Image (spheres, helix red, strand yellow):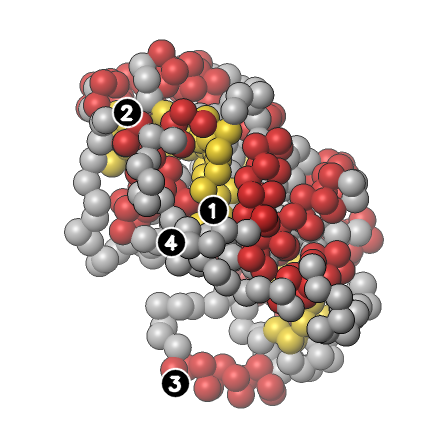
């Protein structure tokens, strides 16, 4: 690492409170919105109408000086917090050394170090290898490639309510057509979607019953012998932070193992300490054959990985995996710092702390507001599903109203769910208990105003 090419990093510390000083959006954001409308297609939409200038910890500040408590963390990317000092320092150090060589031409240590760290921290004691890529969808694509090469089979099994990305193959793997796939076909073939486990909506099926249904469906509609892999999010993210019933995932894994099907855990959202464990798989006793990381791994720099059993990963021929930017030197430097902050820095424990604070606040809201049908999730990945009181009828209108009202008051909270009726809480691990209390107070007021 270089010493003096750049000054010592100074991260802009931001005051820890939300603060609204203009109408939302303010004048500068409105100006930028105009420029954006002229040159950015409508397909790239934004949930909140403010433009952000800086962020630190769990706070982001817009171009008009309004400060927001960020309960979204860029959809679980800035898990260790915005502009974490150690991560910024590591990335800055790397900037002065080398920005790119292409690992497949002339390799560098950071890539290998991230592969070692992933081997160490993902579930299972077996030998593991990792390929690094740029995005979550690219990780999913590579996992499918590798599983197909390893098994010599083509079928890909996915679950209802799944989300896996926006490339052609991953669009075929998503459950929800609008907005992710509608009109963008034809899609990749050999993708088979089976019912999963959604305790709030599947009439109280046990994990074993739901797994039997998934397996029976796949055996009838495809046949186990034609399946290369089953790709599952241990906790479904975009689908609405759906935690499957106890025993569901282990039963699927057992069936996969018995039938030579590669079990792929898509932990792009749920991994990297989001749930108070390194990977959500640990909560279910899963040891996936392949495990996918992206979002939280490099604190905002683009990086993703497929980590898995060495003998499966080595099925792909030399030159069969890779890409120009995969495992970029600055991104891997940031990732090494993220691992260090979670490990030595003790941030891994913060997911459980956030759940201890946030869950009772949300169940308190549920007691006061019958529109909240369920509070669920694990660690810093919690959600509330809003329904017509006493029914399963989704209330996406209420979620839209609440996210908009919260933004007006300086709280960024995201929606999710197949039916658009889930409020999801995925703050960074840097969020304080005070900030959580304050943000939930804002959401309480928005619920009252419905
Ligand atoms: C975000 C996400 C993806 C896609 O990642 P991108 O980096 O947006 O391509 C895939 N799977 C899950 C579970 C995700 O949450």
Mark 2 highlights which residue?
A: 151
Mark 3 highlights which residue?
A: 38
For the residues bearing labels 4 and 1, Cβ distance under 8 angstroms: no
Which of the two discs, 1 and 3, sits closer to the camera?
A: 1
Q: Where residue 323 is drawn, which disc sits there?
A: 4
Where's the C terminus, which quadrant? bottom right
Q: Position of residue 125 (x, y in %)?
A: 58, 21
- Measure the C-alpha gap from mark 2 to mark 3: 48 Å
The answer to whether 447 appears left or right of 287 in the picture is: right
Find out if the beta carbon at label 2 lies less than 8 Å from the nearest ligand 1 atom. Answer: no
Under circle 1, the secondary element is: strand
Mark 1 highlights which residue?
A: 132
Find out if the beta carbon at label 4 lies less than 8 Å from the nearest ligand 1 atom. Answer: no
For the residues bearing labels 2 and 1, Cβ distance under 8 angstroms: no
For the residues bearing labels 4 and 2, Cβ distance under 8 angstroms: no
Under circle 2, the secondary element is: helix
Compared with 372, 194 (above or below) is above
- Could you tell me if residue 8 is visible in this image? yes
Label 1 Cα crowd, 10 Å radius (few <14 / some 14-19 / many 20+) = many
Look at 23% across and 18% down and name the residue there: 225
Q: Please name whichever residue, 436 or 36, is drawn nearer the observer in this view of the structure.
A: 36
């Amino acid at each position: 690492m270089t010493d003096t090419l750049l000054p010592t990093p100074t991260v802009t510390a931001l005051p820890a409170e939300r603060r609204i000083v203009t109408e939302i959006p303010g004048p500068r954001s409105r100006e930028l919105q105009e420029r954006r409308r002229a040159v950015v297609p409508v397909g790239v939409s934004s949930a909140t109408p403010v433009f952000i200038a800086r962020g630190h910890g769990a706070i982001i500040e817009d171009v008009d000086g309004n400060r927001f408590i960020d309960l979204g963390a860029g959809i679980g990317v800035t898990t260790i917090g915005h502009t974490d000092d150690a991560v910024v320092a590591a990335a800055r150090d790397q900037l002065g050394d080398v920005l790119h060589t292409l690992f497949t031409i002339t390799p560098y240590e950071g890539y290998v170090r991230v592969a070692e760290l992933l081997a160490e921290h993902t579930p299972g004691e077996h030998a593991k290898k990792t390929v690094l890529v740029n995005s979550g969808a690219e990780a999913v694509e590579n996992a499918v490639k590798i599983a197909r090469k390893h098994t010599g089979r083509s079928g890909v099994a996915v679950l209802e309510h799944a989300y896996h990305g926006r490339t052609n193959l991953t669009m075929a793997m998503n459950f929800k057509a609008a907005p992710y796939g509608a009109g963008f076909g034809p899609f990749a073939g050999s993708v088979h979607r089976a019912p999963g486990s959604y305790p709030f909506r599947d009439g109280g099926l046990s994990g074993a019953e739901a797994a039997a249904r998934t397996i029976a469906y796949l055996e009838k509609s495809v046949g186990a012998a034609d399946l290369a892999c089953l790709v599952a999010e241990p906790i479904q993210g975009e689908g609405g932070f759906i935690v499957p019933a106890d025993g569901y995932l282990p039963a699927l894994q057992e069936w996969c193992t018995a039938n030579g099907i590669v079990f792929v855990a898509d932990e792009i959202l749920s991994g990297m300490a989001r749930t108070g464990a390194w990977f959500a798989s640990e909560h279910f006793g899963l040891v996936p054959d392949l495990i996918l990381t992206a979002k939280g791994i490099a604190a905002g720099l683009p990086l993703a990985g497929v980590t898995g059993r060495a003998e499966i990963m080595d099925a792909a021929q030399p030159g069969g995996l890779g890409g120009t930017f995969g495992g970029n030197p600055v991104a891997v430097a940031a990732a090494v710092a993220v691992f260090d902050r979670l490990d030595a820095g003790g941030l891994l424990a913060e997911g459980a702390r956030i759940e201890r604070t946030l869950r009772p606040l949300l169940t308190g809201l549920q007691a006061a507001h019958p529109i909240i049908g369920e509070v669920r999730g694990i660690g810093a990945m919690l959600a509330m599903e809003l329904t017509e009181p006493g029914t399963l009828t989704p209330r996406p209108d209420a979620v839209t109203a609440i996210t908009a009202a919260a933004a007006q008051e300086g709280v960024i909270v995201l929606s999710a769910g197949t039916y658009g009726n889930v409020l999801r809480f995925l703050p960074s691990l840097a969020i304080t208990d005070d900030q959580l209390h304050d943000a939930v107070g804002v959401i309480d007021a928005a619920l009252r105003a419905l």
